[in-house]
Image: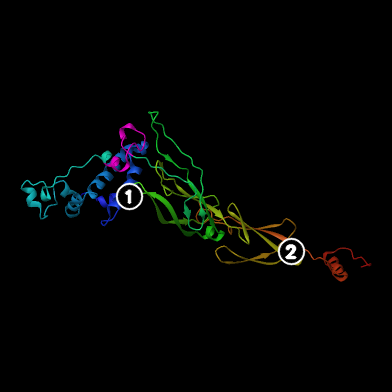
Amino acid sequence: MGADYYNILKVNRNATDDDLKKSYRRLAMRWHPDKNPSNKKEAEAKFKQISEAYDVLSDSQKRAIYDQYGEEGLKGMPPPGSQSAASFSNGSRGPSNFQFNPRDADDIFAELFGNNPFGFEAMGRAKSMRFQTDGAGTFGGFGGVSSANQSYTEGVSSASSSHPRKAAPVETKLPCSLEELYTGSTKKMKISRNIMQANGRSATETEILTIDIKPGWKKGTKITFPDKGNEAANQLPADLVFVIDEKPHEVYKRDGNDLIAHHKISLVDALAGGTVNFKTLDGRDLAISLTDVVTPGYELVIAKEGMPIAREPGNKGNLRIKFDVKFPSRLSAEQRTGIRQILGGRVDPLL
């Protein structure tokens, strides 16, 4: 079965010339062998396949033959049973005597990119790409994003050659409530970024990114979308990184996998006991009975009512309740006497 060129280029059958160029540019830059020194054999095969697909689909005559007869039609060998089988058996080279001569992958690459994209003399016909991060990119709900422009280089034998620089990752905070980090959630973020068109001009592209928040994720967790930053000449697109940030909660504060809650109780409840009620982060009503005398610094620990532990599905931290005992501002003589009698203290006749 022949190759599916549309699938290779990740376009549909109605793709325009601009669609084909845009897709080819991205895939070719990603899979060029010089960009994949640690996996060069696979990259060479992929790069050649991508270039062949573009060569066929960007040529109206080749594309028409491919759409009708598939890859076999291009090579002069239509599938058995097709209407053109007879012409092939009679020595014809294919529909309308078409002869397919695949072009060199590097030649196709050079046509679209110009000169020397990676600094290697063997590829001395390509045009550089770069990604620039200057805060101009906007992300839904976040406003501007800034990142220092940094670059990386890889060893090249020629002193005059270098790889196109890749800008530092563009990081932006992703505020999440404790409820979202407790139960997990899905956020859809709309981003706008600059892209380079096949004609070398810059354009704005809008995209919706989906972020799946996993239960138990902590502040500082990073979600990376490779190559989703701005594009510009002579730099590779930067990675877009969302960093989890925790919104303050009115009841709970996170401490690792534990939740801490501060609760005020009266002196009577501290001494005689009572019931403390909480609403959990997943909406349950939690009633906790106090049986111990609550003294200064007392902390009540409720096992497995804390945050989910991301790497231990089904396991949770603890809920730690710290109490603030409210003492009365004044007592009457009768109340003082009664308290002393109850607690077994001495009764002062002068009171």
Magenta highlight on residue 56: no
Tell me the quarter of the image containing the C terminus: bottom right
Instruction: Find disc 1 in the rendering and name its residue.
Output: 22
Asked if residue 293 shows in the view, the reply is no
Q: Which mark is residue 270?
A: 2
Residue 205 x %, y %: 40, 54
Q: As drawn, which residue projects farthest toward the left?
A: 90
Residue 155: quarter of image: top left
**Measured from the top left, where is residue 185 in percent x and y?**
49, 60
Residue sitting at the far right: 350
Q: Which residue sits at x=81%, y=65%?
A: 329
The amino acid type, in three-letter code, at marker 1 is: Lys
Residue at 35 percent of width and 49 percent of height: 197
N-terminal label among 2 and 1: 1
Number of on-image labels: 2
Of residues 125 and 179, the one nearer the viewer is: 125
Q: Nearer the viewer, residue 83 or 331?
A: 83
Q: Residue furthest bottom?
A: 334
How many C-alpha atoms fall within 10 Å of the one at disc 1: few (<14), some, or many (≥20)? some
Question: Which residues are the magenta region?
Answer: 108-126
Amino acid type, label 2: Ala
Give the structural element (helix, strand or loop) at label 2: helix
